[in-house]
Image (cartoon, rainbow, N blue to C red):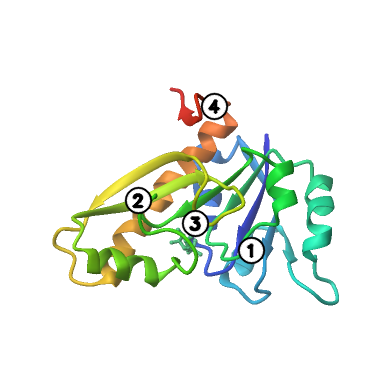
Amino acid sequence: MLRLAVFVSGRGSNLKAILEHPELKNLIEIVAVFSDKSDCGAFQIARNYGIETRVLGKGEGRISNENLLETLKNYKLNLIVLAGYLKLVPVEVVREFENLIINIHPALLPSFGGKGMYGINVHTAVFNSSAKVSGATVHFVDAEYDKGKIIAQKCVDISDAKSPEEIAERVLRVEHQLLPEVIKAFAENRIFVENNRAIIKS
Ligand code: GRF
């Protein structure tokens, strides 16, 4: 069993997609869900599944950046998944978990990424660009927003999309397929970094 932690900030539909994916049931265990927002929808989903929730930040009962690395080590994790997590992961965590942290981004990186490019901002930028395709990207996390090696991408046709919201809906559908697929590949030891590229072997 792959031991996973999932980091979230919002509603948690990607978390739900991981939890409900039939092919992941016997392959992974989500041991904790971390969030910077104590009242996020994703926490409710985690609780419905009996998964431990941990709040990040300063203050009573929260895990500070300084304590995060130690806390994560104690869970004996095999993979950390950022699924709609809006903060940067502290550099010492990124270093310790090199090639073991992945993020899902709702556009085709390296375009439409970076600081401030989250949620509807991404889809508005894509809409305004007049691009004909968008999609989802799963990539390794390094110390900068949306810059790590790309592991997998899935495209969607947006040539007839009438609004950023419509693009968001179409992209979210492929996110829910792509993220579980990549996690499955991890669990089956099929992801490698070779020649400075991330590759999924079949
Ligand atoms: C998704 O679009 C994800 O790609 C992005 O934030 C959104 C989170 O959605 N990073 P949800 O919380 O998983 O529903």
> What amino acid does circle 2 point to?
Leu
Q: Are marks 2 and 3 in contact (CB under 8 Å)?
A: no
Mark toward the start of the polypeptide (2 vs 3): 3
- Disc on the earlier residue, 1 or 3: 3
Among numbered discs 4 and 1, the one appearing first in the sequence:
1
What's the distance in space between the residues labelled 1 and 3, CA to CA?
A: 15 Å
Going 43% across and 22% down the picture, which residue do you hit?
A: 202
Looking at the rendered image, the quarter that the N terminus falls into is top right
Query: Distance between the Cα atoms at labels 4 and 1?
Result: 34 Å
What residue is disc 1 on? 48
User: What mark, if any, has residue 192 been given in the picture?
Assistant: 4
In contact (CB < 8 Å): disc 2 and disc 1: no
- State the CA–CA distance, disc 2 to disc 4: 21 Å
Name the element at disc 4: strand
Q: Residue 87 appears at what percent x and percent y?
A: 61, 65
Q: What label sits on residue 14 in the rendered view? A: 3
Question: As shown in the figure, which amino acid type bears the numbered disc 4?
Answer: Phe
- Are circles 2 and 4 on residues that touch, CB within 8 Å? no
Q: Which residue is mark 2?
A: 108
